[in-house]
Image (cartoon, rainbow, N blue to C red):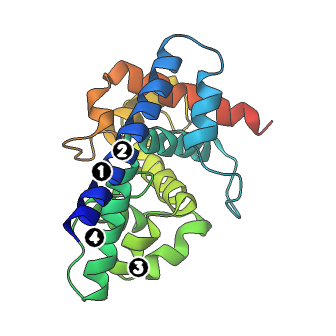
Amino acid sequence: MWRFCIGCIVVVLGIHIIDLGQRNAAILRFMSGRQDGLDLIAADYGPARTCSNQQHTDIYNLASALVTVETLATPRFEQWAKYVLVRIVTIFDMAVPNLSLGPGRIRVSTAEAVLQYARAVDVEYFKEMSRDSLALELFGTCASIKVAASIIAVIVSRSPSTTATVDLKSIREVVVVYNGQGHTVSRAAVLSRAIYFQLVYGLFQHYRFAML
């Protein structure tokens, strides 16, 4: 039995190391100036084009960019571990921990607070969800993009230094606030703020022109 357990641990560690290597390679490819760097990141870590009723606005394109970068920044093992944890606590009717969850790394408390002010039609059904259901919903890519779009809309509307539109200045403001949701240890924190911004802005342009 103990050999089987050790074997499982070795396999998990191996998968984790390979996953980290692939993410580092993607970042290095982008930093090296390769033109296909963003395309590969979008293809490997970006949302699939299957989100129903998703609006193709600048706010949603920026939300897609943020979710892509956060997905790139979060090892797959961490994503699995958090999903299993939330599943367990909901099954046993325990309080859901206020962690950064899903592809967009959005805290449940942040989602709840923002949804109170959200006006978009496609997030109305989130408002009726229990905290447990909302936590599980955040693990979905499409749901993460929709909630992230609501977060962006609130940031842009409340910031005195930005306009009501998504421009370079407002994107900088959004990146600073969004990336400061309370991450303690993440690959996003290891990346410099400048590289993080460049990734988000590059992917925003990628998704923006992909819709034309």
Q: Nearer the viewer, residue 86 or 144?
A: 86
Would you identify the image quadrant in which residue 1 lies?
bottom left
User: Of 171 and 30, which appears nearest the observer?
Assistant: 30
Disc nearer the start of the sequence (4/1): 1
Residue 202 image offset from top left, x and y in percent: 56, 25
Kindly report which numbered mark, 3 or 1, lies closer to the viewer in this rendering: 1
Q: Which residue is mark 1?
A: 10
Residue at image position (43%, 64%) is 138
Label 4, secondary structure: give it. Answer: helix
Q: Residues within 10 Å of mark 1 (few under 14, many from 20)?
A: few
Dots 4 and 1: beta carbons under 8 Å? no
Q: CA distance from mark 2 to mark 3?
A: 32 Å
Q: Are marks 1 and 2 in contact (CB under 8 Å)?
A: yes
Q: From where the camera sits, is residue 206 visible?
A: yes
Distance from Cα at disc 4 to Cα at disc 2: 22 Å
Which quadrant of the structure image shows residue 108? bottom left
| The label number, if any, that marks residue 85 in the structure image | 4
Vertical order, 201 against 44 (above or below) = above
Q: Secondary structure at mark 1?
A: helix
Q: Are marks 4 and 2 in contact (CB under 8 Å)?
A: no
Q: Position of residue 19 (x, y in %)?
A: 42, 40
Task: Say which amino acid is labelled 1.
Answer: Val
